[in-house]
Image (spheres, rainbow, N blue to C red):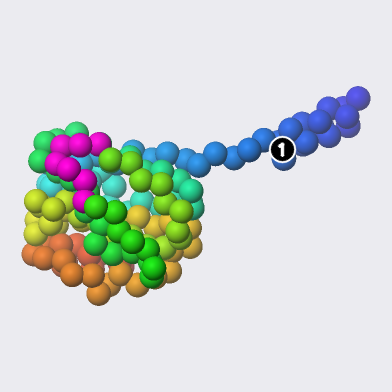
Amino acid sequence: MKKLLALVAAMVTLSTPTFAADTTIEMLNKRDDGAKMVYSEDITRIDVGDTITWVPTSKGHNVEFIAGPDGWEAPRKSKLNKEVAMTFDTPGVYLYQCSPHKSMGMIAIVVVGDGDNDISKAKVKGKSKKKLKALLADL
């Protein structure tokens, strides 16, 4: 009987569909660690098919993608103070910024799957140059 129950449990586990994970990232004026004009996560690692939702916890922020894998077409930048969600179907490394605060270092990275494309040549301004270098070192 134990073998039969174990077999049934294994069959249920194997036949249960796996669903993409959802991640929420907040757009913040200040994070708990004292960093200002930031997203709640600097580097987010997800699987292909996962969705990220950016929530404007503080006013005046948006999401604008500025680099991604070859052949990937960046979506339009989001409107200020609006929640935006995106499902990532193409593996790679993506770089995004807050348009109004890009020179203040408000950038972040999404790594989808194995994510091995080079975003180091992406054009960023001000404090974002130093932050991008640090983020790439952490990949």
Left or right side of 82 for 116: right
Q: Amino acid at mark 1?
A: Ser
What is the magenta segment's predominant secondary structure?
loop
Residue 32: in magenta span? no
In the picture, the quarter occupied by the N terminus is: top right
Residue 137 placement (x, y as % from top left) = 31, 67
* Residue 138 visible in the picture: no
For this view, does 130 lie left or right of residue 86? left
Tell me if 39 is positioned left or right of 10 in this view. Answer: left
Give the image quarter of residue 29: top left
- The residue labelled by disc 1 is 15
- Across and down, in percent, residue 15 comes to 71, 37
Kindly indicate the quadrant of the structure image that contains residue 59. top left
Please report the bounds of the magenta region as a residue range. 77-83
Q: Residue at x 30, y 69 (%)?
A: 119
Whether residue 78 is in magenta: the answer is: yes
Q: Residue at x 38, y 70 (%)?
A: 70
